[in-house]
Amino acid sequence: MFLKGTLLLLIVACTVVSHPIPNVTSSFCDDNVDFQMDTNLNPVGQNFSYYMCMDVATSSARLDCKAGVPCPAGGDIATSITKDGVIYNIAHNGSCTLQSCPTCVPPNGTPFSFLIIDGANGDQSKGVAVYNGTKTMDGTTVDVFQHDRSKVQAGAGLMYWYLSGNDLLRTTYMAPNGISGSRDFSGTLKADGKGKRVEPAPDSSFDIPQNCPSPTSAPLHVVSVWPSMIQSVGDSF
């Protein structure tokens, strides 16, 4: 009995060690689609499509929207660039306005929090995700990590992360009502070869247009979330 129990513990330990929670690639650019589906896999609401860049080391992020295409930044915004807690919103007509977002910095501020799997780096304050095997997604075999957030926060749902190596290809949040919200990075790592993933994100991605005013030129309107933060995809946990 002792030997059998010891062997079981060793098997469990090896399983856990072989699938530790990874640190997700923290500097990249990629096409992105946010979408929701109901329990019957029917689309819900409106999809958001945009190009996004992130670089955690420099606290920089960028979101590019196309005119006429639904985007979380809003219909008038062509580009939002975040650097050191300041958001530079460049409209399609070229005008530039600034917002202060003191919480939009890594590691736990959006959008950088997208890249942190619950329990990564030993932080158990939001609970710990578990390895849930592999699946085929858009022709690519991915590792799946899952976390039942209701164990930490009453009324929360299930969160999933889908990775190819250390590259995040999709997150999905399954709300208690059965509605799922996904953020899909449709990069060249997928078998269909579509997308424009670039690693690392070029420094030029975060260059501020010359016509943008200085953050110190006038008091800034303060916001608490990044433009693409959406409750339905689990960003606010």
Image: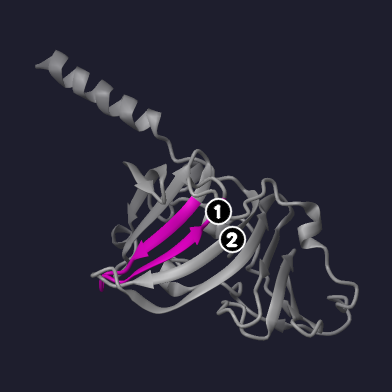
Q: Secondary structure at mark 1?
A: loop
Q: Is residue 175 magenta?
A: yes
Q: In terms of sequence position, does the residue under pointer 1 or pointer 2 come before the other?
A: 2
Residue most extreme to the left: 1
Residue 204 coordinates in the image, percent (x, y): 81, 57
Specify the principal SS of the magenta part: strand
Q: Residues within 10 Å of mark 2 (few under 14, many from 20)?
A: many
Q: Quadrant of the N terminus?
A: top left
Residue 110 coordinates in the image, percent (x, y): 58, 65
Query: Which stretch appears magenta?
Result: 169-187
Toward which corner of the image does residue 159 lie, by quadrant? bottom left
Q: Nearer the observer, disc 1 or disc 2? A: 1
Label annotation for residue 194? 1
Q: Residue at x 85, y 84 (%)?
A: 218
Q: In front here: 150 or 125?
A: 150
Q: Secondary structure at mark 2?
A: strand
- Position of residue 157 relative to residue 91, above or below, is above
Residue 43 coordinates in the image, percent (x, y): 35, 74
Contact, CB < 8 Å: mark 1 with mark 2? yes
Taking the image as shown, residue 204 lies to the left or right of residue 67, namely: right
